[in-house]
Image (cartoon, rainbow, N blue to C red):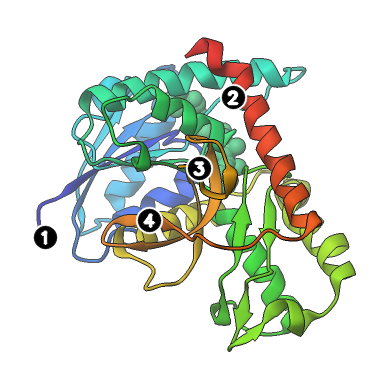
Amino acid sequence: STKPVRIAVTGAAGQVSYALLYRIASGEMLGKDQPVILQLLELPNEKAQAALKGVMMELEDCAFPLLYGMEAHSDPAVAFKDTEYALLVGSRPRGPGMERTELLAANAQIFTAQGKALDAVASRNVKVLVVGNPANTNAWIAMQSAPSLPRENFTAMLRLDHNRALSQLAARMGKPVSLIKCLAVWGNHSSTMYPDYRFASMEGESVKDIINDDAWYKDVFLPTVAKRGAAIIEARGQSSAGSAATAVIDHMRDWVMGTQGRWVTMGVPSNGEYDIPKNVVFGYPVTCSGGKYTIVEGLKFDDEFSQDRIERTLAELISEQDAVKHLL
Ligand code: NAX
């Protein structure tokens, strides 16, 4: 279609957005024939709005043929008007000495307001991706604050964890990432997530059998994926941005265009799959087709290690919900 679609991006002057907006405008997310209008949201303060103007000047200087329009906003109730896609990247970072509960509360406020704004003015089909941390709980808050929108339209980003896990497995086997199928990352986008290679295959063979090294899996692979964000900060002095933007593009493109049966990981509200309580936004393996995702069902959790990992990441999500639910 040649009709442009409206894409809202929050935290638009931040570093993830700086790596993301050019790729959306060049057609990497929705395809090279889909014109876009960017509705960019930043904090109302002068510094943030000035930085946003600078990003928009650069986007203008790219002369992207697909970029039909751009808007700068400081109010979500305006920024989300008629938007078909909402990428909620901005959130409150942990300040010095800030308690976890304070951080959760600050974000609860942001994502309650943004959920309400989506509910009021966005397209009824809006596809929402929450990137800002704590991503799963923020997505849950936005979803709870938008009762007139379909629950399944609210998702959280675990794709960066998925991609990190893919690359580590591929490197260990000395094979291209594209050959690995059926990897899953369960749970929260945090160090408790569970990257699970039990069902993964490469050229028809079990990845677990090919690697055949349980100690490597448990003592090297799992902590490497879990601590990768911290390792990037340590090395670069700043948190992941290029890889995070790539994961946003992957998540949205796959959701919209489909995965042709391939599994990917998305944080989505549970309907009770794998005994996760309803509405908890949980990392699940999914396939996508026709603009919808389907949770991969029927996988067995018959080993104690996996059961324990799922319980741990679920417990963390429940405790995050408990810390904020009185604020909704
Ligand atoms: P930055 O601090 O560079 O940018 C965040 C931007 O959001 C800032 O410009 C800020 O002014 C803006 N902002 C804050 N509150 C806002 C609000 N209420 N409305 C609109 N804008 C608001 O952070 P950046 O490195 O870009 O990271 C963005 C978020 O992504 C962080 O919460 C970060 O923790 C999270 N991440 C999540 C990842 C994931 O896999 N789910 C990976 C990447 C990233 O670390």
Asked if disc 4 and disc 3 are in contact, CB closer than 8 Å, the reply is: no
Where is 305 relative to 206, above or below?
A: above
Comparing labels 4 and 1, the label whose residue is closer to the camera:
4
The residue that mark 2 highlights is 321
Q: CA distance from mark 4 to mark 1?
A: 22 Å
The residue that mark 3 highlights is 272
The residue located at (68%, 58%) in the rendering is 301
Asked if disc 2 and disc 4 are in contact, CB closer than 8 Å, the reply is: no
Q: Position of residue 286 (x, y in %)?
A: 46, 59
Secondary structure of the residue carrying tag 2 is: helix
The kind of residue tagged 2 is: Gln
- Earlier in the chain: of badge 4 and badge 3, it is 3
- Earlier in the chain: of badge 2 and badge 3, it is 3
Task: Residue 315: name its quadrant.
Answer: top right
The residue that mark 4 highlights is 293
Comparing labels 1 and 3, the label whose residue is closer to the camera:
3
- Earlier in the chain: of badge 1 and badge 2, it is 1
The residue that mark 1 highlights is 1
